[in-house]
Amino acid sequence: MRVAPLTLERLVQPVVEICDFSGVVPWRLTAREIDRYFADPGKRAHATARTKMNGIDGYFAFLGQRYAGEIATKENTSQMRQDRILDEAAVTADPLHLMRLSGIGESAAMRYVSAAHPEKTGLLPR
């Protein structure tokens, strides 16, 4: 699949802008960074937010189509889910957030936070 340079630039621009604002790379971009970006003054206008969100959706849809074969051939899809939850735990260290985001139980959320932040394990409520 070939994408015209202008189309690719239009897809990537909002993602790069949010990543620059947040100081993260695109594959570490979370809903939290996107929310922080749109909470910034001057970026709250409905039309601005909608346009940029459509661009972000388009970017990730493009990646999903481009790499669908590699994603589908991942041997263990549950491993992908576990990796995503662990990555989120590394970023937030908030068991309640993990429970809401991933639909996991309290003990599983605590295990993810403990795995991501072993130095904080003794500080967490049991």
Image (spheres, helix red, strand yellow):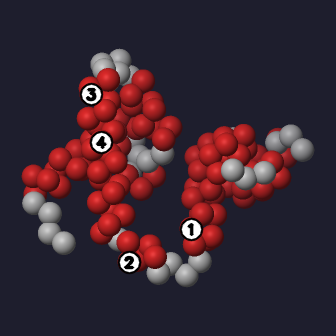
> Earlier along the polypeptide chain: callout 4 or callout 1?
4
Tell me how far mark 3 sits from mark 4, CA to CA. 10 Å
Mark 4 crowd level (few <14, some 14–19, many ≥20, 10 Å Cα): few
Q: Is residue 100 above or below residue 70?
A: above
Q: Label 4 belongs to which residue?
A: 54
Residue at coordinates 48% horizontally, 41% vertically from top-left? 31
Residue type at mark 3: give it.
Thr
Mark earlier in primary sequence (1, 3): 3
> Vertical placement of 48 versus 113: above or below?
above
Rendered residue at 45%/52% (across/down): 28
Q: Earlier in the sequence, mark 2 or mark 3?
A: 3
Q: Position of residue 66 (x, y in %)?
A: 30, 69
Numbered tag placed on residue 69 in the rendering: 2
Determine the residue positioned at 33% across, 57% down: 61
> In the rendered view of the protein, which quadrant contains the N terminus?
bottom left
Disc 2, SS:
helix
